[in-house]
Image: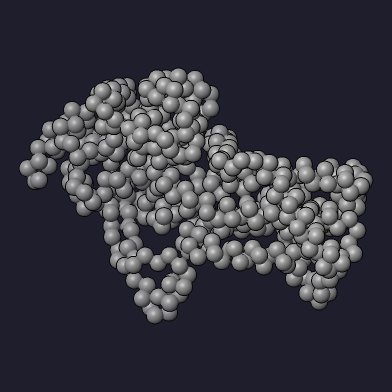
Amino acid sequence: MIQVDNVSMRFKLALDRITSLKEYMTKLIKGQLQYEEFWALRNVSFNVSKGEVVGIIGKNGAGKSTLLKIISGILKPTEGSVKCSGSIVPMLELGSGFDHDLTGRENIFLNGAILGYSKEFLESKYEEILEFSELGKFIDVPIRNYSSGMLMRLAFSIATVVNPEILIVDEILAVGDADFQEKSKARMMELMGGGTTVLFVSHTIEQIMELCSRVIWLEQGNIVIDGKPDDVCSAYLQKV
Amino acid sequence: MNYIIRQCNNVRRYKFLLQQLVSRDFKAKYKRSFLGVLWSFLNPLLTMIVQFIVFSTLFKSDIPNFAMYLLIGIVFFNFFSEATSMGLTSIVGNASLITKVYIPKYIFPVSRVLSSSINLLLAMIPLFIVALFTGVRFTFAVLILPFSIACTIVFCIGVSLILSSAMVYFRDMQFLWGVLNMLWMYATPIFYPESILPQNLMILFKMNPMYHFIRLSRALILNGESPEFKAYLFCVIAAVIPFFIGTIIFKKAQNEFALHL
């Protein structure tokens, strides 16, 4: 389903960020164009087969988010390759495609299109999204007037309306008030239990133990252990 | 060959997204303005009236039907400058999306140019009204007009692809482009006749794609006849070459976009 083959990702950290031509030219002439290399991932390989729920753990800066971005196709790895078969829905940050001048209804279609859903699909699921988000009559109000909780509810409802073949989740389980958190958690469980392949990043070890069938521990861009949740988590907890 | 098939599939798959982005740009443009979409008609008309007054009283232009001559130039050049300056910011302006979701990135400049094209089509309406008032006799030649519009759109997509990738690396582009755009406008015969161009520099002016698109459109509407075959050929060349250059540059640059946004 997902084949990650010897992936390495190098970032060039310009010591100061050059964004203008003049700056670039003066630095170039002075010979001050220096980069510091930083390897966010080094020779990472693993395979995920259909239906597996894989948790990824590790400290901040271990390369978890970079890995998810490479698998989603947002970043291109410096070396190595990633092969995915099936539709991917990345939930890296909810609501990043919203336009704040449009109404909730218009944003459902805009954001749905960004996530790759078809028009017919969105029309048929429209009621379901509306009901799940509990927005009611606010759906025809420009979303710049929404509270942050309402925005998150709408975004979550759009993102999870499909049953994708591959779901990529970067810590978004808890949105909205207590009731909605309960509901969204149930929805995530439903998605993960429905034969979907899931890649899941979290800092909450209990969540990982509860949900995942396999855990990968990343540290400084390398895989430390890749195995059963119990083994990996206990090793991780001991180290931390 | 495989690459072409894949791109065609992509276009079909992302048609809905393209549609959504175009309608968003279009809605956002006139949101909260009182006259709304009427500005698409008013803008070229008002510019035409101002320039008409200035140039017909100050400079005593001897171009027959100067109002129409001017308006055709203004409509096409306005489209060019609107489409390219919208295209310029299309990648940087959608940074939050590009770093969060995978979407083929050319969608952004293309959608900006297409939403400007809607404006271009709307501006055709006052153009035809003025044509009727000034007594232009239409012939079948006017049916070829979509050809010159299509060439202009393809050209603008090409330029936007180049500008939007340049903008990611150098934010100076937006200021630079404002000046270049103005220079470009003066270098295109919009309010002056072709005949005042110095003969020895003619080759330089013929390198300007906008010159060919506007010249063809004027011939079709004002003279009511289809010009020589060479005029069409020049239009196709002037549209396709920048388009290919833009595609190549964009394709090379796009993998690094997410790192620089």
Please say if A36 is above or below A166.
Answer: below
Where does the image place residue B167, in percent across and percent down from the top left?
A: 50, 59
Residue B213 visible from this viewpoint: no
Please say if A119 is above or below A94.
Answer: above
Q: Quadrant of residue B160?
A: bottom right
Please say if A88 is above or below B205.
Answer: above
Position of B139 with respect to A171 (left or right) is: right
Residue at 38% x, 78% y is A31
Quadrant of the drawing holding the C terminus of chain A: top left
Where does the image place residue B67, in percent across and percent down from the top left?
A: 84, 55
- How many labels were placed on the picture? 0
Nearest the camera: B60 or A236?
A: B60
User: Quick one: which residue is furthest to the bottom in this view?
Assistant: A30
Q: Quadrant of residue B121?
A: top right
Nearest the camera: B46 or B129?
A: B46
Position of A34 with respect to B243 (left or right) is: left
Residue A171 visible from this viewpoint: yes
Quadrant of the drawing holding the N terminus of chain A: top left
Nearest the camera: B31 or B82?
A: B31
Where does the image place residue A56, in percent across and percent down from the top left?
A: 23, 40
